[in-house]
Image (spheres, coloured by chain):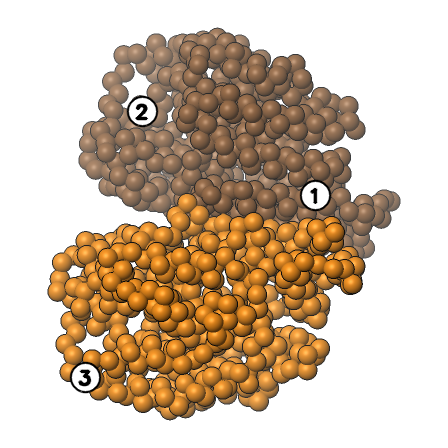
Chain colours: A brown, B orange
Amino acid sequence: MTETATQDLEITFTRLYRYAHLASIAGWDQAAMMPPKSNEARAKALAELQVLMHQTLTCTELAEQFQALDGVLLDDDAQASVREMRRHWQQAKLLPTRLVEAQSLAQSRCEHAWRRQRKENDWQGFLGNFREVVDLAREEGKLLAEVTGSTAYDALMDKYEPGMRSSDIDRIFGDIKSWLPELIRKTMAKQATDTVIKPQGQFPVDQQRALGVEIMTLLQFDFDAGRLDVSAHPFCGGVAEDVRITTRYNEDDFLRSLMGIVHETGHARYEQNLPREQVHLPVGQARSMGIHESQSLSFEMQLGRNPQFLALIAPLVQKHLGQQSALNADNLAALFTRVQPGFIRVDADELTYPAHVILRYEIERTLMDGEIAAEDIPALWDEKMMAYLGVDTRGNFQNGCMQDIHWPGGSFGYFPSYTLGAMNAAQFFAKIRSGQPDLDAQVSAGNLSPVFTWLGQHIWCQASRWDTSELMLRATGEPLNPAHFRRHLERRYLAA
Amino acid sequence: MTETATQDLEITFTRLYRYAHLASIAGWDQAAMMPPKSNEARAKALAELQVLMHQTLTCTELAEQFQALDGVLLDDDAQASVREMRRHWQQAKLLPTRLVEAQSLAQSRCEHAWRRQRKENDWQGFLGNFREVVDLAREEGKLLAEVTGSTAYDALMDKYEPGMRSSDIDRIFGDIKSWLPELIRKTMAKQATDTVIKPQGQFPVDQQRALGVEIMTLLQFDFDAGRLDVSAHPFCGGVAEDVRITTRYNEDDFLRSLMGIVHETGHARYEQNLPREQVHLPVGQARSMGIHESQSLSFEMQLGRNPQFLALIAPLVQKHLGQQSALNADNLAALFTRVQPGFIRVDADELTYPAHVILRYEIERTLMDGEIAAEDIPALWDEKMMAYLGVDTRGNFQNGCMQDIHWPGGSFGYFPSYTLGAMNAAQFFAKIRSGQPDLDAQVSAGNLSPVFTWLGQHIWCQASRWDTSELMLRATGEPLNPAHFRRHLERRYLAA
């Protein structure tokens, strides 16, 4: 009964999965491979596909198939599967196709021009495209919010973090703001007397890439089902069967690309280990962006900046980049835990990173809820950067409010996921450590399987079977508890 | 009036063009970038897109839009545009969606397995998948042939060479068979006493690639609207706005990759110079595969193996691959005109190449028309290779009937286009030379613009405005005339 009842829905959602495959690969290509003159043709092709996917999700037949399930007894698995399909459907049917197409085109245009405008620090030029992106996103937010009566911002954030509301975020970020500045101050004071040796480049791209591939192999990335390439803004794209991660190389500095690769490999392993027999349906896909970021940050922060892990990889670093004292295990650990407020979020250390996220959240929430206009962003940015990190960004748009791809790409409501992910990751590792008190010794010895086994069992193979709070509860025995994040940071940065 | 009358059709064909964009990029990725484990997901996604494109072409609305044009007075340009749209529509509506999907899946499966099976010389394993590809292609051919009453093979060839029939090909190839063996024999006798120095490798891939990029630049490939990559079987893919050519490198032998790049650059320049304002409609797209191959062979054979062109690029070859006497202009010319029958079509010299094509044509025609079965191919192959080229291929499937991607990929009726292309190219260059008697001197001096200007004006910007015979007539003043091809070969290979 169950099987027949959901079969038609599954056919439609399988078709959507295949369309999404093409969108993902074309999107990856756009960022990693595509020459500049083809952007317009690509943007139109991708917008056409967005329209098609939206039409597929909003066609009458699908509505009838959902209605046909009213009163049908489904088992728990089928209920979960239908719940996730319904979530996608309900969001889609609130939006007119015209808006979906207009957003796709406006975002492509704005993001493409942004790549140049950022280099030129051209905020006024950027505003010309960006206003339309903002207007369309607000319209989307309002339409999505109508049924639930939430704010526009909450409705947009729900796309990335189902069930999360800005009242939750305000509480969580409010807590962080109460202790983070003090922790940063104490850490900087403590580190003031540390000796940290700066690595002496050049570090040729080929050698950095070879190191990255070896680290990805250590982290069990499956190269028969994925690739490592280069893009201006690193990301994890592609599809579960074919995960494409990217990085960017700077021959003066290998630290960022190395840890960027570790980060994206965390995303990739989640995708590569989603339950393959269900990955064509929403219930078999990643739970939320906060859970996705928890995987990348489990790899980058919990594992990657752990001194034992850095001791494990130090010989690989030296093998590829040469022998120098800056590349020994202790100095790598010092480099990767060095706290120093700066302009750029993606280059931020573990402690100042949340401040970057909170600032963006506060700005994008008021922007989407109509309390400020796009023009007001730079002044707010300057004020908050000074207040939270003591950094002067006035007039420096390219390293200020124009630094991220999210806003030109129309992603409003995504930023909180980074810090939710960091908190989730801290909670997962607290749980892993409680079951494996000798985890650090095992990592030192090159045995990372306790981490992968736990994540595989509790997160990767669970996909979207449970909603996020249920997933957290089942995995760790408690709902999201920010105390683990604070404890992790204090242990790493203040302990002798 | 005209504009309104064709507007709805143009909207549909523009949508098809955008879908085809995604199919091309995903297809390029599959050949040049994709890791092996994702083939199944990719094949399903591409088949879904083929189904969608077929449904779009065969929907009731489109039929009504064509019917609405009955009796409407259209200007010449609009008539040409409608003629080309109608051609695509009429072919599509003869085929059931089920067949389109089954072909896409069977071809993906067969081609993917072929990559391994060819290495393993596994004809029996290959047959397991290939029989289905053959059966489905025959079914397609029969359905396409029903309306015109042609043979299945002719109907399939019409997809690549609109208007061409096997009775034409039989006549043309019959003529070639009457003089080619004697020409090959005489040439080999003449070359028997030539001194040709074999280049001494290794030639590292990076250096070969750098040389290729410089040659492509000389040939005015636009790198802001295209790329050069690597694939197992070189091809020109992507879209007109973003042309992706590929090659394969052998560090012992740079000759093949170099001339392969010149060949694909010819395809690429045709695509890059199609009329941009019409390229989203069939009338603005490439005329036929024989015209496409005429552009690659204009570059590879007419220009690329011309001693004056080789003298022009010899300094570039030496710059990238080192100074050795084998790389001087005279020896390069001797290398690139050396005639030696061999197993492999894509490695064949200019004189033995048509024999490879004729052999394939004769086999695939009887295969599609049901006169032979897939199992019969190897014996026929052996017999014809011995008869036409004196080469023994018995038991050597990998370098025999399993060497080409066309059949596993379901392309039957394509092979004649190669030799039609060679003949077209010879006819174009006869015309160019008649207007530019000092062409060789100009090429020596590095001025290739007479060639590009003529091709741009008479072929590239004409796209599908005229049918093939009209295009030939307008460009050269006569229909396809194989005598130009014979004269070109005799001049190059027999003249003192």
Residue B438 placement, left or right of B277: left
Residue B315 placement, left or right of B260: left
Chain of the residue under the numbered disc 2 shown in the image: A
**Residue under the image location 31 percent in, 37 percent down:** A313
Q: Which mark is residue B192?
A: 3
Residue type at mark 1 is His
Q: Are marks 2 and 3 on the same chain?
A: no
Measured from the top left, where is residue A82 in percent x and y?
74, 44
> Circle 2 sits on which residue?
A335
Callout 2 touching callout 3 (CB < 8 Å): no
Q: CA distance from mark 1 to mark 3?
A: 67 Å
Determine whether the residue tagged by mark 3 lies in a helix, strand or loop. Answer: loop
Residue B293, quarter of picture: bottom left
Residue B341, quarter of picture: bottom left
Determine whether the residue tagged by mark 2 lies in a helix, strand or loop. Answer: helix
Residue type at mark 2 is Leu
**Is residue A54 depicted above or below B70 in this figure?**
above
Q: Is residue A35 visible?
A: yes
Residue type at mark 3 is Ala
Q: CA distance from mark 1 to mark 2?
A: 47 Å
**Residue under the image location 42 percent in, 25 percent down:** A120
Callout 1 touching callout 2 (CB < 8 Å): no
**Is residue B148 depicted above or below B28 in this figure?**
below
Q: Earlier in the sequence, mark 1 or mark 2?
A: 1
**Is residue B31 depicted above or below A25 in this figure?**
below
Q: Which mark is residue A54?
A: 1
Measured from the top left, where is residue A22 in percent x and y?
57, 50
Chain of the residue under the numbered disc 1 shown in the image: A
Measured from the top left, where is residue A110 in percent x and y?
54, 31
Residue B164 vs residue A399, the one in the foreground: B164
**Residue under the image location 62 percent in, 27 percent down:** A132
